[in-house]
Image: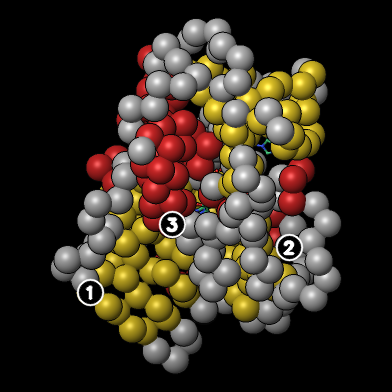
Amino acid sequence: MSRTTPEPLIVLGAGCAGLSLAAALLRAGVRDQILVLDRRGDWPDDRTWCFWDTGGIPHADLARHAWPAWSVETPAARTVARGRRHRYVHLRSRELYDRLLAELEAAPNCELRTSVTVTGVREDARGVEVSTSAGSVRGRRAWDAMGGAGPLLRGRPDGAVELRQAFLGQEVETATAAFDPGVASLMDFRVSQEDGLHFVYVLPFSPTRALVEDTHVGRRPVAPAVRRATLRRYLGECWGVDAFTVLGEERGSLAMTSWSFPPVRSERIAAVGAAAGAIRPSSGYAFVRLQRHVQAVAAAVAA
Ligand SMILES: Cc1cc2nc3c(=O)[nH]c(=O)nc-3n(C[C@H](O)[C@H](O)[C@H](O)COP(=O)(O)OP(=O)(O)OC[C@H]3O[C@@H](n4cnc5c(N)ncnc54)[C@H](O)[C@@H]3O)c2cc1C
């Protein structure tokens, strides 16, 4: 990647939103220097993104599995809905990160600086100044793409309701057929409700492979070991699975809050992704909103 000239456009954070924004700026034909800063140094396959493919969603072509039907289940009843036009699709973070990192790498006007922690940003008459663990950097504009708990979002006003949607998912492989790969189970409430709203999310990729995610919405943290034990019990009781291999694990704790994340911070400082409130407080979904917002920002910068 090239060295940046002074006064680049600066993207703070290289997660889903930051990488998507930098790539969208490049795809939109922006020729300014683009500098992307992140404290991390690698992009492991740390999450999966699911969404209803309503058409025209950037990167939906990377989806590796699609379900034409989805269910919600309680001990008393099971409801299955079908949507021929809007399938529920699944995309692995690894594939999106690889695509976006390759696009940034190939662009002569883009630089990704890793292992740099952003501590602050301020606007002045000439542009913006970003403070980092590696010194300060000047730019023309900056976008906060550091997620919903980044350093620029400290000091939220009192009064907002804030619950967490916290989960631990395991991708499991069973020796014998157990799952129906035609139906995604969005919420299965056949688990204890003693610790608040509690359900398991099941994405079957084949009769013998599925992502099963133990999920709570509430305020009390649940230890990973407790979640793993719940999944083991759930797979036995609800799917007749007694033996399985864990192929991978993902975790998350998403803010479900009534607080309005400010997408525009000042004339030259704005936000994208979770930092801009992309995570829906009712469901935890963010991918589609985030991608559409990033597209709109890139189009506006290119115009
Ligand atoms: C496990 C998991 C599964 C999810 N599944 C779905 C799903 O199925 N569907 C859906 O719609 N949404 C889903 N979401 C919600 C949402 O889509 C994701 O959280 C998404 O990754 C948000 O993107 P983001 O870029 O805003 O934040 P992130 O992806 O978290 O990126 C933030 C980036 O900022 C960097 N950063 C943070 N602080 C600093 C700092 N001080 N200095 C420098 N860099 C910093 C981080 O290293 C990171 O790279 C999921 C979330 C998780 C955690």
- Mark 3 lies within 8 Å of ligand 1 (Cβ measured): yes
Tag 2 secondary structure? loop
Q: Is residue 273 above or below residue 53?
A: above
The mark lying in front, picked from 1 and 3, is 3
Can you give x and y, in whole percent of width and height, for residue 157 in the image? 81, 66
Which mark sits nearer the N-terminus, 1 or 2?
A: 1
| Residue 273 circle label | none
User: Quadrant of the image for the C terminus?
Assistant: top left
Which mark sits nearer the N-terminus, 1 or 3?
A: 1
Tag 3 secondary structure? helix
Can you give x and y, in whole percent of width and height, for residue 283 in the image? 51, 69
Q: Is residue 252 visible?
A: no
Q: Which residue is mark 2?
A: 222
| Amino acid bearing label 3 | Arg
Q: Which residue is mark 3?
A: 289
Q: Which residue is mark 1?
A: 82
**Depth check: 228 or 119 in front?**
119
Say if mark 3 contacts mark 2, CB within 8 Å. Answer: no
**Depth check: 216 or 141 in front?**
141
| Amino acid bearing label 2 | Val
**Depth check: 259 or 42 in front?**
259
Which mark sits nearer the N-terminus, 3 or 2?
A: 2
**Depth check: 236 or 85 in front?**
85
CA neighbours of label 3 inside 10 A, class few (<14), some (14 to 19), many (20+): some
Residue 301: image quadrant is top left
The mark lying in front, picked from 1 and 2, is 1
Which residue is farthest front? 125
Instruction: Identify the residue at horizontal 46%, vertical 84% (top origin).
Output: 74
Q: Is residue 283 visible?
A: yes
| Amino acid bearing label 1 | Arg
